[in-house]
DNA sequence: GTTTTTGCACTGACCAGTCAGTTCAAAACA
DNA sequence: TGTTTTGAACTGACTGGTCAGTGCAAAAAC
């Protein structure tokens, strides 16, 4: 849609380069992996913009610069492509959150510090993959869909990382033992998700530091009182 | 997919209740208004479950117990039906939030009290209209769709109510003047939205009071410290 | 008698998924 | 070395089905 004809050369180089390195490592050939990656990237933006049902397989194939048949050679169906995309993205997110928590721990930080680092990691992830985040929020609370179970897994995976930190904080006395861990975790996720989507959509010029500071302030109750 | 057949009665009560109030207000006859109301209710659950594109006009008509032609007699198109549904629902939500804020004000409460009352009102709304909330979250950050402008209006309408309370709180010194009003408002919306959806989906047996207390605690920074 | 609803056949566009055929790099061979 | 074979990866025209929206005559409601 952008250029008259999407350039289709210059690709083999990448393919060939990867081919050699990871062919042995992963399961499939790396040519295939590269194609799957292109399909993920095409699908994530289209589905974020239009939703799953409104996005056609033809569109995904076209944006990925690949024939329709290739989509079906690599994924059993449109739904399966979507489910694997979800798992893939959430894997990246949870890894990022977990790493933030672990790093804080290793540096001898408190659990509040860990939470704060996770908020920052969450914001960073959303800034890097806004389309995925959009799609995640839009599809997470759908019921009656084929991929219900994947959705549950993918939700629990994210919430669990946060619940874990909250639980440790309660255990060491840093947090009140009256807090409701699952609900608080969900609320935190929502806070970061919605604030970040708003940031990206309506004030994209602001820096991550800036947004992070605002959320930190809110979280630590430094909103009321003061001046 | 879950139960054999989802129960479809018990709805008329709500319809009839709304009928009386809005028949005089709106322009059209109340028969027409009743039909539109039935269509809203049918559409909201179906779209919440499946998404806009995956929901067919035939389904909506069938669930509303109405002929397909009637849908097009009352709405210009499927999209228009959806847009009007969005405006309708958001109107109810903002009215509820505004009323909570006003009541608190009139009772001489602080702005923190007002926020707290609005959280409760928000939770109440979500408990009453879970399908609408689901749909609202799912569609709010979509781009590239026909109803972009409606979406913006409908977003701003909700956020504005909260921003207003925050602004008043800053003005009277109750809140720090360093808070970022739009971002904080968005974060609060997200917190309530996601916590409530989680409540409805995964712990529906809990009481509103209970959930409200947890969110209140989080908001007022009574999480860290204490025990 | 006017407004609203019904029922239903119809159209044209669109779309998920299929499949017979093509490509080409690497393996086997000579 | 150069030649042939193999098969994984990819292609795109095609199919069967679905769905938004139309048209309209007759019935029902008011």
Image (cartoon, coloured by chain):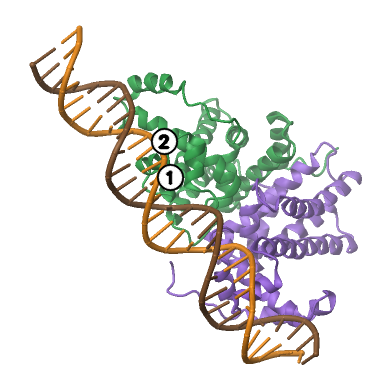
Chain colours: A green, B purple, C brown, D orange
| Quadrant assignment, res B39 | bottom right
Q: Quadrant of residue D26?
A: bottom right
- Give SS at disc 2: helix
From where the camera sits, is residue A90 visible?
no
Name the quarter where the C terminus of chain A is drawn: top right
Taking the spot 79% from the left edge, 39% from the top edge, the residue there is: B180
Report crowding for label 2: few under 14, some 14 to 19, many 20 or more residues within 10 A (C-alpha). Answer: many
Tell me residue A127's x, y (percent). Answer: 62, 33
The residue that appears at 63% across and 62% down in the rendered structure is: B210
Residue A116: give x, y in percent of width and height.
63, 35
Quadrant in which the N terminus of chain A appears: top right
SS for tag 1? helix
Q: Which residue is mark 2?
A: A36
Residue drawn at the location 58% of the way across and 40% of the way down: A131
Can you say whether B133 is above or below B24 in the image? Answer: above
Indicate whether A11 appears above or below B209: above
Which residue position holds label 1?
A81
Q: Are marks 1 and 2 on the same chain?
A: yes
Quarter of the figure with residue B49 = bottom right
Query: The disc numbered 2 marks a residue on which chain?
Result: A
Question: Do tag 1 and tag 2 residues touch (Cβ < 8 Å)?
Answer: no
Q: CA distance from mark 1 to mark 2?
A: 9 Å
Q: Residue A92 or D30: which is nearer the viewer?
A: D30
Asked whether, in this view, residue B115 is left or right of residue A168, the answer is right
Where is residue A19? Give x, y as percent: 35, 23
Subunit that carries the residue with mark 1: A
Q: Could you tell me residue C19's position as x and y percent? A: 29, 48
């Amino acid at each position: 849609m952008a250029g008259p004809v999407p350039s289709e050369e210059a690709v083999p180089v990448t393919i060939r380069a990867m081919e050699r390195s990871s062919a042995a490592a992963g399961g499939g050939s790396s040519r295939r992996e590269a194609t799957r990656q292109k399909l993920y990237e095409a699908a994530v933006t289209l589905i974020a913009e239009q939703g799953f049902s409104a996005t056609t397989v033809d569109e995904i194939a076209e944006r990925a610069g690949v024939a329709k048949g290739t989509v079906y050679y690599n994924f059993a169906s449109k739904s399966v492509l979507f489910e694997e995309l979800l798992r893939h993205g959430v894997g990246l997110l949870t890894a990022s959150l977990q790493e933030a928590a672990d790093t804080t721990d290793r540096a001898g930080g408190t659990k509040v510090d860990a939470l704060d680092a996770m908020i920052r990691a969450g914001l960073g992830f959303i800034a890097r993959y806004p389309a995925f985040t959009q799609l995640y929020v839009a599809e997470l609370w759908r019921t009656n869909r084929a991929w219900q179970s994947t959705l549950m897994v993918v939700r629990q995976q994210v919430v669990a990382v946060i619940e874990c930190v909250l639980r440790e904080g309660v255990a060491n006395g840093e947090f009140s033992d009256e807090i409701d861990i699952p609900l608080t975790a969900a609320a935190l996720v929502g806070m970061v998700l919605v604030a970040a989507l708003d940031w990206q959509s309506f004030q994209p010029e602001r820096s991550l530091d800036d947004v992070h500071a605002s959320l930190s302030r809110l979280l630590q109750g430094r909103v009321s009182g003061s001046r």
